[in-house]
Image (cartoon, coloured by chain):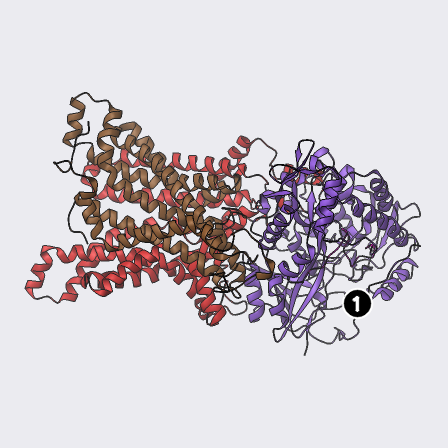
């Protein structure tokens, strides 16, 4: 067991190393660089630009820059943003809360609605409801999220004026109600795809349970249908559900990116696009590593859980 | 000479049980019809429609659908939207399909080798797959699109680079389970080379999941192209694509909503159809019996 | 003096003020920069209300001496002061200084090399410390500190022997005569010595995240990625402030910016303003005031003059004649912008109104090319001596309006046998080496040729400024004309505005003749304010609509 875990841990580190190298190379491949934002400034001369490049350490050979960055990362210094000079971790942290809020609420919506649809569909298998739910799920998986968001803005914001068109809250009104008002549209839009996934998954999970022998036994014993259903379906679905949630974790960065763009939500996806647009290397690398670490950690955790359960590995 | 693992009497593939099961899947059939219609429209549409997709007419800007001969209206430069939509469809569908081919090729190669060989090679390859999966795909796609010139070929390569991993995983799992089957052992005892066994014996039997994965990859690739073109990093004008049509429509949402609704609907129809087909194929190839 | 047609309405006031300043009449009190008589005196009225300004690019640099972009100016102008300011009329006004130094009042020596600036004695920093000449010295020295990530060092690098004569007087010597320095100083905000001198690394100072200035507003707080708040400075030495709070809100999408303006969430739209397609609707909104504000940049079709196709004047003239500017402006830009023939902003004192107007005439264009020997080949594209009249055109991808202009021009050029291929790049990529080292064929971009509204366009037009050939500026078109070079040099060494005007008029004439770039239109921005917001006035000589937040107030 221990050797297995050490093995996986070592592999994870190597993985992170490779990810960071590839990321660094690709980022530096992009022509332009962090000084392109001054390219149109009439007052910046070549001397000024050269000086700035030197001061930002951009003139050093790539491998030197990489090693410098990697070494600092290991000591906990994620670098400073080229734009406002703030520490990268702080920058990421600020935007992380916004993204978590969005992802969290959309996940809650997705699980709630998805479970209801999935369970009901399984119980009333082959009914109209089930059919519509299945087709609906497939369509929902096919709709581009940003398009759905744009339609949502058009209908609920521009035409009906019920919901705001963007941002996290109205300045000056930091009440919970205001936050919720701004949260509705983006989280529903983001939840669309997840509702589809959850409903399909819960349907399968419920069907598995319904068909099992012990259900028939329990039914024979006279226990109420609903009681059986709830207890066993949830029990059966719980562990894989946690695994599924774990798999969603890495998409904290990518999943919300387009939604944040459409709704001008100040989250990590928005941060990534802005930083890429300004070639703010430290922040982009920071986001990359953050996301990669999330993936690696969740994979590792999944492996550990499997290792604990699977006796072959546990006893080796 | 291919050893047959499944049905004994040689039968035409369109008569097989798989094909029959597929035909019963109504949604999949609808999907096939829709894709056929869409492809036809994209190929023939621009030739049949009265307006050229490139002709700029500043006096006919922002015409709503069903204005004169502009069946779907016009865009901000006065170009016929229907013609643009179908030209864009050519690019979006082509990019999606090509990305699928490329990623399926790479993924299958990696998966078969890793699954059959196992051991060190297998581990290294699969860890490589994991490495690529750890990369936030959006990062890779956007950064690569910014680094390289955003031509349709580059976009195809970039999308393929982020899609082959799923295929590899599926194929590797399938090959690993097939590896221990009798026909493979028989092949080895007959002295067939590893390459022969991998690609002439195992691969044809793993084709099921590969086709399913491929179909779903097309769907995903079309969505990906829409995403990156929408963000401004994908197909550049004057080449139209469904994604960059949406990018241009965002600004005019309040005044000309059809500019956003129509290309988005096209994307949804195409992707839904491929998903239906993929679902149908998955059910058709699934030999484990009733699972719906 | 050459015949000039006076087309500006407030020319007489401006001329009068200029003559006043030139005549050495000292202005001891900083005149109200707006000059409107109906603003109530601040003394007895408490600042009230709040103004929310919408920006579509996020301000992230708060130390005004560090390298920053236009949107950061909005914040700097409210937090800090400079020695002088430029008012909307183009006249220099004293800000932290008591008077603007000139050769007439002795502030600048006759040979233009020795400068003396007298400062106010009633200014305090936001933390209560008094402002002195030491702060000015510190600021100018920090800019030229090789370790500091300064914005521009042009002009400042010529300063020698900075001497603090007294807390209210400072002198220095210029290494060479440089008239634009006066204007440069209007964009050089003074920073506090007592807070920055003890920092080991001024680039990472805490000051940069919580700046302290002398301006009408103090730093309050910042929510990164969303907005930043400034609070009124009750001890401001100048006129104002009249509002309690100014909030700069970051809204990355211009359409959402407009929507929030419509719904009243923001009171003033700053960079990048309202898009032209919303102008019509916006001007009809109740409770909103929408103005078309001229900007300093000129949107042009830039040519790389080292490409074989563009070396001939006939080709450049033909391309210019093939641009249907009217259609572009009326249809694509909804009539919001206006035509121009020169790089000088129309509001500038140095704008030459006598330049020949462009005429859209495809036949004339074809004739020009035929006469010059450019004959259509088998594919319809003209060629001469093996060179085809085919080239790439690049602009910032994602900018819909520019992309539309490109595609329209592509179609029009095709009608005269010119093949233009579109090849766009994201802004962060385009303005790197591709632009600066002249790697493009042609490009469409809005460019400001002036620095701090000073007419000296050496950085853009002098042959010594061609970076691709080792020069020091941003003459990306690689334009080279010895007469222009000589005139530019002379202009930078002349202080008298009348004399300078003659020089820059001539430069504009030559440039119009040479056509190194083809002007499309003069930038005009659609700025929206909420009804009731008074004291707001645009200023072409600054880069932001929020250049004078001190004067804003709500109608009571």
Chain ID, purple in image = C
What are the residue bounds of the magenta stretch? C337-352
Quadrant position of the C terminus of chain C in the picture:
bottom right
For residue C81, above or below residue C153: below
Chain letter of disc 1?
A: C
Residue B53 x, y percent position in the rendering:
51, 52
Q: Give the camera-side residue of B76 and B112.
A: B76
Chain ID, red in image = A
The residue at the far top in this view is: B191
The residue at the far bottom in this view is: C556
For residue C127, above or below residue C412: below
The residue at the far left in this view is: A220
State the hue of chain B: brown
What SS does tag 1 mark? loop
Q: Quick check: C311 left or right of A101? A: right
Residue C302 x, y percent position in the rendering:
69, 45
Callout 1 crowding tier (Cα within 10 Å): few <14, some 14–19, many ≥20:
some
- Secondary structure character of the magenta stretch overall: loop
Q: Quick check: C103 left or right of B168? A: right
Quadrant in the rendering for residue C44 = bottom right
Residue C492 can be seen, yes or no? yes
Residue B162 can be seen, yes or no? no
Residue B167 x, y percent position in the rendering:
32, 40
What residue did someone put label 1 on? C32
Q: Quick check: C86 left or right of A79? A: right
Q: Give the camera-side residue of C246 and C130.
A: C246
Residue C348 falls within the magenta-colored stretch: yes
Quadrant position of the N terminus of chain C in the picture:
bottom right
For residue A85, above or below residue C235: above
Residue B254 x, y percent position in the rendering:
52, 66
Residue C14 falls within the magenta-colored stretch: no
Quadrant in the rendering for residue C269 = bottom right
């Amino acid at each position: 067991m221990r050797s297995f875990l050490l093995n996986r841990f070592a592999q994870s580190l190597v993985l992170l190393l490779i990810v960071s190298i590839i990321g660094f190379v690709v980022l530096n491949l992009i022509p332009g660089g962090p000084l392109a934002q001054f390219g149109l400034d009439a007052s910046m001369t070549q001397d000024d630009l050269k000086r700035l490049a030197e001061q930002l350490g951009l003139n050093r050979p790539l491998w030197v820059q990489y090693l410098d960055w990697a070494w600092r990362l290991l000591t906990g210094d994620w670098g400073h943003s080229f734009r406002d000079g703030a520490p990268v971790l702080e920058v990421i942290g600020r935007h992380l809360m916004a993204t978590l809020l969005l992802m969290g609420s959309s996940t809650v919506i997705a699980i709630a609605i998805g479970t209801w649809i999935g369970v009901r569909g399984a119980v009333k298998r082959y009914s109209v409801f089930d059919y519509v739910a299945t087709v609906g799920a497939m369509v929902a998986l096919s709709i581009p999220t940003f398009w759905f968001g744009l339609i949502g803005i058009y209908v609920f914001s521009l035409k009906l004026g019920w919901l705001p068109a963007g941002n996290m809250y109205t300045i000056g009104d930091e009440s919970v109600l205001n936050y919720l008002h701004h949260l509705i549209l983006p989280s529903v839009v983001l939840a669309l795809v997840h509702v589809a996934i959850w409903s399909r998954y819960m349907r399968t999970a419920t069907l598995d349970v319904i068909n099992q022998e012990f259900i028939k036994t329990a039914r024979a014993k006279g226990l109420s249908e609903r009681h059986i259903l709830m207890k066993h379906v949830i029990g059966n679905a719980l562990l894989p559900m946690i695994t599924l949630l774990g798999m969603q974790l890495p998409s904290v960065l990518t999943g919300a990116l387009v939604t944040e763009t459409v709704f001008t939500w100040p989250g990590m996806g928005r941060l990534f696009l802005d930083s890429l647009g300004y070639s703010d290397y430290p922040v982009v690398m920071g986001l990359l590593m953050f996301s990669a670490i999330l993936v690696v950690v969740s994979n590792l955790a999944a492996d550990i859980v499997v290792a604990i359960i699977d006796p072959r590995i546990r006893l080796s | 000479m291919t050893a047959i693992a499944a049905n004994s009497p040689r039968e035409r593939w369109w008569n097989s049980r798989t094909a029959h099961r597929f035909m019963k899947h109504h949604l999949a059939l609808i999907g096939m019809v829709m894709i056929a219609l869409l492809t036809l429209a994209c190929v023939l549409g621009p030739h049949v429609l009265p307006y050229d997709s490139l002709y700029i007419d500043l006096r006919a800007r922002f015409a709503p659908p069903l204005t004169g001969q502009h069946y779907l209206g016009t865009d901000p430069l006065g170009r016929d939207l229907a013609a643009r939509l179908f030209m864009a469809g050519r690019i979006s569908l082509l990019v999606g399909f090509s990305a699928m081919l490329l990623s399926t090729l790479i993924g299958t190669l990696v998966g078969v080798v890793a699954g059959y060989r196992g051991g060190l090679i297998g581990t290294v390859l699969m860890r490589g797959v994991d490495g690529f999966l750890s990369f936030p795909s959006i990062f890779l796609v956007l950064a690569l699109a910014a680094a390289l010139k955003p031509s349709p070929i580059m976009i195809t390569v970039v999308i393929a680079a982020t899609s082959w991993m799923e295929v590899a995983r599926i194929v590797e799992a399938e090959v690993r389970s097939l590896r221990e089957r009798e026909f493979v052992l028989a092949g080895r005892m007959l002295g067939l080379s590893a390459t022969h066994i991998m690609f002439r014996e195992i691969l044809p039997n793993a084709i099921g999941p590969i086709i399913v994965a491929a179909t779903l990859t097309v769907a995903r690739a079309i969505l990906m192209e829409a995403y990156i073109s929408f963000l401004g990093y994908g197909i550049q004008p004057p080449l139209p694509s469904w994604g960059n049509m949406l990018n241009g429509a965002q600004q005019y949402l309040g005044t000309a909503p059809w500019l956003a609704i129509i290309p988005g609907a096209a994307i949804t129809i195409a992707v839904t159809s491929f998903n239906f087909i993929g679902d149908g194929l998955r059910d058709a190839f699934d030999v484990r019996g009733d699972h719906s | 003096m050459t015949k000039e047609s006076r087309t500006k309405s407030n020319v007489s006031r401006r001329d009068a003020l200029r003559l006043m300043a030139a005549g050495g009449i000292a202005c001891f009190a900083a005149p109200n920069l707006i000059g409107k008589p109906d603003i109530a005196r601040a003394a007895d009225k408490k600042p009230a209300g709040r103004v929310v300004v919408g920006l579509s690019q996020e301000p992230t640099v708060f130390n005004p001496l560090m390298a920053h972009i236009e949107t950061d100016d909005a914040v700097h102008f409210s937090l800090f002061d400079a020695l002088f300011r430029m008012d909307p009329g183009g006249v220099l006004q004293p800000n932290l200084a008591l008077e603007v130094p000139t050769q007439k009042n002795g502030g600048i020596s006759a040979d233009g090399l020795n400068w003396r600036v007298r400062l106010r004695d009633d200014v305090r920093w936001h933390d209560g410390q008094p402002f002195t000449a030491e702060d000015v010295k510190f600021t100018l020295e920090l800019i030229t500190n090789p370790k500091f990530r300064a914005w521009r060092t042009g002009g400042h690098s010529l300063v020698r022997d900075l001497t603090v004569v007294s807390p209210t007087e400072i002198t220095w010597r210029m290494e060479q005569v440089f008239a634009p320095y006066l204007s440069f100083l209007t964009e050089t905000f003074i920073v506090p010595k007592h807070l920055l001198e003890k920092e080991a690394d001024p680039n990472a100072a805490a000051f940069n995240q919580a700046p302290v200035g002398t301006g009408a507003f103090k730093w309050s707080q910042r929510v990164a990625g969303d907005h930043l708040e400034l609070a009124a400075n009750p001890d401001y030495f100048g006129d104002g402030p009249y509002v309690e709070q100014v909030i700069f809100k970051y809204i990355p999408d211009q359409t959402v910016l407009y929507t929030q303006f419509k719904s009243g969430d923001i009171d003033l739209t700053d960079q990048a303003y309202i898009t032209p397609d919303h102008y019509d609707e916006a001007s009809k909104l109740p409770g909103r005031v929408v103005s078309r504000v001229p900007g300093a940049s000129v949107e042009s079709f830039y040519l790389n003059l080292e490409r074989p196709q563009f070396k001939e004047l006939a080709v450049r003239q033909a391309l210019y004649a093939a641009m249907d500017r009217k259609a572009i402006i009326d249809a694509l830009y909804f009539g919001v912008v206006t035509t121009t023939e020169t790089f000088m902003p129309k509001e500038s004192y140095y704008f030459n109104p006598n330049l020949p107007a462009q005429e859209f005439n495809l036949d004339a264009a074809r004739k020009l090319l035929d006469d010059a020997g450019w004959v259509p080949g088998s594919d319809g594209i003209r060629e001469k001596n093996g060179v085809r009249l085919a080239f790439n055109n690049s602009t910032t991808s994602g900018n819909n309006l520019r992309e539309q202009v490109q595609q329209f021009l592509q179609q029009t050029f095709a009608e005269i046998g010119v093949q233009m291929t579109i090849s766009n790049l994201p802004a962060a990529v385009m303005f790197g080496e591709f632009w600066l080292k002249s790697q493009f064929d042609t490009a469409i971009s809005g460019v400001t040729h002036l620095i701090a509204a000073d007419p000296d366009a050496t950085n853009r037009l002098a042959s010594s400024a061609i970076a691709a050939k080792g020069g020091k500026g941003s003459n990306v078109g690689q334009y080279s004309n010895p007469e222009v070079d000589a005139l530019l040099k002379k202009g930078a060494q002349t202080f008298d505005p009348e004399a300078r005007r003659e020089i820059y008029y001539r430069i504009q004439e030559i440039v119009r003749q040479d056509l190194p770039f083809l002007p499309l239109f003069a930038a005009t921005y659609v700025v929206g304010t909420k009804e009731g917001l008074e004291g707001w006035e645009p200023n072409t000589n600054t880069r932001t609509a929020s250049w004078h937040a001190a004067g804003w107030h709500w109608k009571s």
